[in-house]
Image (cartoon, helix red, strand yellow):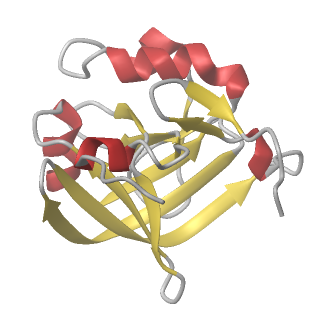
Amino acid sequence: MKKGITPDEAEDCFSGFPVVLATVKGAKDNIITLAMCHVFSFKPPYLGVGIAPKRFSHGLFKESRDFAVNIPTRELLKATEICGSKSGRKVDKFEASGLTREKAEKISAPLIAECPVNIECVKVKEVDAGDHTWFIGEIVAARRAESYKVADMMLYWGEYRVIGELVK
């Protein structure tokens, strides 16, 4: 038998969301730590990030034609936390986190050299969805370190986690 639960409790039924460091070019480059990142289409390849309008990065993403999604691993936890707890209004997150800007191949937004996966996206759509806007981009270039495994990716749901067990 199943019992009814609240919408907030329904959200708790998800095991986690991938943690990404999204970068965007603005008057100054910015990094935002996000746990709202999702594939929206395979053909064409669309990837989206959800950002609350109150965030400094929201305005940068609205103004920019492109962005990058960089996937950190647990070794970058401290830098990931810094980028998620400081505002780009007040600090240069590259400097504060010790992360290295890297020139992208096809977009204006910088990549993060230390991240084993960098995905370059050209924005194709914005979708207002409640308390977040989804910025959806077409993947125009991507690269991955040979040593990277999906199990290395961090997930977030109240705390940072990594995939620990393969069910099937």
Q: Quadrant of the C terminus?
A: bottom right
Across and down, in percent, residue 130 comes to 12, 55
Across and down, in percent, residue 22 comes to 42, 43
Q: Residue furthest front?
A: 1
Vertical comparison of 96 with 115: above or below: above
Question: Which is nearer the eye, 1 or 40?
Answer: 1
Horizontal side of 61 relative to 92 (left or right) equals: left
Residue 85 appears in the rendering: yes
Quarter of the figure with residue 112:
top right
Q: How many marks?
A: 0
Residue 24 appears in the rendering: no
Q: Residue furthest right?
A: 147
Residue at (61, 20) in percent of width and height: 77
Residue at (25, 18) in percent of width and height: 87
Residue at (18, 55) in percent of width and height: 133
Across and down, in percent, residue 95 comes to 45, 13
Across and down, in percent, residue 89 comes to 18, 20
Residue at (46, 48) in percent of width and height: 13
Question: Which is nearer the eye, 160 or 89?
Answer: 160
Vertical comparison of 74 with 85: above or below: below
Vertical comparison of 136 with 20: above or below: below
